[in-house]
Amino acid sequence: GAELTVGFTVTGLLEGAPITLAGARPGDRLILTRPIGSGTILAGEMAGQARGADVAAVLAEMARSQGTVAEALAGAHAMTDVTGFGLAGHLMGMCEASGVAAQISLDAVPVYPGAEALAAQGVRSSLYEATRGVAVRMKLPKTDLAALLFDPQTSGGLLAAVSQEDADAVLARQDIPAWDIGEITEGTPFIEVR
């Protein structure tokens, strides 16, 4: 390409069993650690439609370490990062690997300032159509806010399936961002958005 691209990989050793996509259990709470909408905000920035303050807020959040959050979620039954497949795609991956379904409350999902307004204007990430394919296995309203469930994230948050007790403990902490967005339910892999 015309621009320099730099990539890196960090490796290490894990003591004990890893937390994977598999392992989510009916009754688990779904904890999300960052708002969604970064793909829409960044697409809006490239199109000259996003507000500078909104872009700055997204960039600041993306640069924040999630080490403390990851430590707080160390007891999760299943966990993933929310990145290129969007929140819906990554949650479906967890449901498939765990053999469960999920329900999420759209009003509980945190959204970056400005993302919903840009979505209402039709601003979408270039990967949006590919990530929207999971919608055939979902029940969801047709709203701009629901469209952000398919927004591919850059440096997105963690999505964890945790027991109610662990969820209460994480949500009670003041030093980490965390939102309870729904729960794991019994059934074939399917997501109901309320």
Image (cartoon, rainbow, N blue to C red):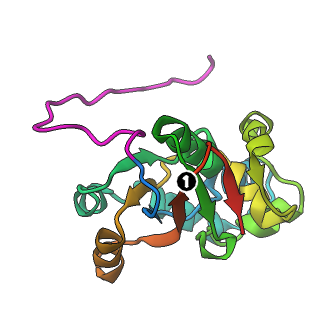
- Residue under label 1, please give it: 186
Total numbered circles: 1
Counting from the top left corner in percent of width and height, residue 162 is at 36, 61
Query: Which residue occupies 29% across, 59% down?
Result: 73
Q: Nearer the viewer, residue 30 or 179?
A: 30
Query: Which residue occupies 38% across, 48% down?
Result: 78
Counting from the top left corner in percent of width and height, residue 77 is at 33, 51
Question: Does 181 sit above or below residue 191?
Answer: below
Main SS type for the magenta part? Answer: loop
The range drawn in magenta is 1-23
Query: Which residue occupies 42% across, 49% down?
Result: 24
Classify the position of the N terminus by image quarter: top right
Q: Nearer the viewer, residue 166 or 56?
A: 166
Q: Nearer the viewer, residue 147 or 119?
A: 147
Q: Is 29 situated left or right of 41 in this image?
A: left
Visible residue check, residue 111: yes
Most extreme residue toward the top is: 1
Counting from the top left corner in percent of width and height, residue 174 is at 31, 82
Counting from the top left corner in percent of width and height, residue 147 is at 78, 56
Q: Is 43 situated left or right of 4 in this image?
A: right
Q: Is 160 situated left or right of 45 in this image?
A: left
Visible residue check, residue 153: no
Classify the position of the C terminus by image quarter: bottom right
